[in-house]
Amino acid sequence: MKKTLLLSLIAFCLFSCYQKQATEQTLTPVRPITDANATRETVALYNRLDALLNIGIMLGHQDALTYGMAGGGWHNELGRSDVKESTGKYPALFGYEIGHLEVGAEYSLDSVYFKDIKRCVREAWKMGGINIISWHGNNPATYYLPDEEKNYASAGTSWDTKGDAVQSILPGGENHERFLGWLDILADYFLDFKDDSGTLIPIIFRPYHEHTGSWFWWGEKLCTPEEYIQLWRMTVEYFRDVRNVHNLLYAYSSSWMKDEAHYLERYPGDEYVDMIGYDSYANYEGQKYNPETDYQTIEDYKYNMRNFLDIITGYAAKTGKIPAITETGMEGFEYEHYFTDALYDVIKDYKVSFFHFWRNSPYKARHYYAGYPGALHEEDFIAFVNMPGILMLDDIKDIK
Ligand code: BMA
């Protein structure tokens, strides 16, 4: 009897001790997020993003740490960043692209080894930065077709709109199991983003983007709103509930949108989305605006950006979602005041988490969106980075 009492006492003490620890480990998000079991760091990231909204707007750069244009082009030299070399400051937000991971490749469609992306994610996190990942995954319906059937330019890629890909991967579809296998590979990868102490690093994940356009296999003309929503929810549920991936915040990002109803037509629901954004680019004068392709002159760009920002910040005000400009820029920035005029003139009026410049590719002609030493109109970029409200790494690293 005494022994049983003693054992119960020990059990009780252990339980209270565990409970205490569990309480200390948990952190409450300022608003419910997609994953109720998100890691402490993921919740902290969400709360931090929310707090940062009141301070300014973060500058993000895709593949900031992996390659760039500085000095005639560089690749995989840890610590380098075009933005840093031009302005003396690192971006606050660091982007990566993981297309081709799903088919077992060692490097991405943009020729970055996945092991190096991991290294950069760790480095950015250690410096106090925030990481965001996009996924131009291959077309699950056409990727495995025999070579003779893949005799067209975009065959098998994200840009291949053939094969009813979305329908084929939803439950009951012929590629469903195979697609879950792709998600497994991504889940394993996300679960391997760890800091030096082995703690999972939280990531903003932005899948199936620009879905109001029809250039990717998940685009507007390629699936119904219900199918898109099902695809999104299936992905979140697979990561979160089946694979126990708890270090993700989910970002929904359209391209051009007509109005709020259009923006929300394929919205998977507040319980499945943490950040709301859109992608929008400025193009060269002469390329008239066309919603099909998203080509926009500077004037179109300013006009549309205001409209899009009104829509997403309006929805954010109603729901508490965190709004962001998930991709923007002007390829080659020929317009000499792109940064200080076209972009700043618009964003200064909005409370938005970040704007994310696309990549500075040393391998693709004129394919760069952020300043680098010696870039055309670099002075406009440097002036912009130093304007009120623009947050760089040093401005955010100590804000928890
Ligand atoms: C596009 C271009 C492509 C790239 C893709 C994924 O907009 O930059 O060259 O492969 O994004 O990063």
Image (cartoon, rainbow, N blue to C red):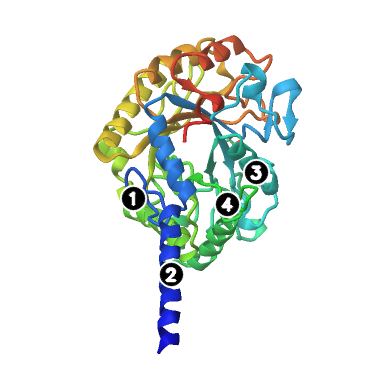
Separation (CA) of disc 3 from disc 1: 28 Å
Pointer 3 local density, CA inside 10 Å: few below 14, some 14–19, many at least 20: many
Quarter of the rendered structure image containing ligand 1: top right
Proximity of marks 4 and 1: CB atoms separated by less than 8 Å: no
Which part of the image, by quadrant, shows the N terminus?
bottom left
- Nearer the N terminus, badge 4 or badge 2? 2
Give the number of the mark in front: 4 or 2.
Answer: 2
From the image, tell me which residue sits under label 1. 268
Disc 1 residue: CB within 8 Å of ligand 1: no
Q: Nearer the viewer, residue 351 or 371?
A: 351
Separation (CA) of disc 2 from disc 1: 44 Å
Proximity of marks 3 and 1: CB atoms separated by less than 8 Å: no
- Nearer the N terminus, badge 4 or badge 1? 4
Proximity of marks 2 and 1: CB atoms separated by less than 8 Å: no
User: Taking 374 as reference, is 59 above or below it?
Assistant: below
Query: Could you tell me the amino acid type at mark 3?
Result: Ile
From the image, tell me which residue sits under label 3. 117
- Rendered location of residue 169, percent (x, y): 46, 61
From the image, tell me which residue sits under label 2. 13
- Nearer the N terminus, badge 3 or badge 1? 3
Query: Could you tell me the amino acid type at mark 1?
Result: Pro
Outermost bottom residue = 1
Give the number of the mark in front: 3 or 1.
Answer: 3
From the image, tell me which residue sits under label 4. 199
- Nearer the N terminus, badge 3 or badge 4? 3
- Rendered location of residue 300, percent (x, y): 39, 19
- Rendered location of residue 318, percent (x, y): 24, 37
Element marked by disc 3: helix
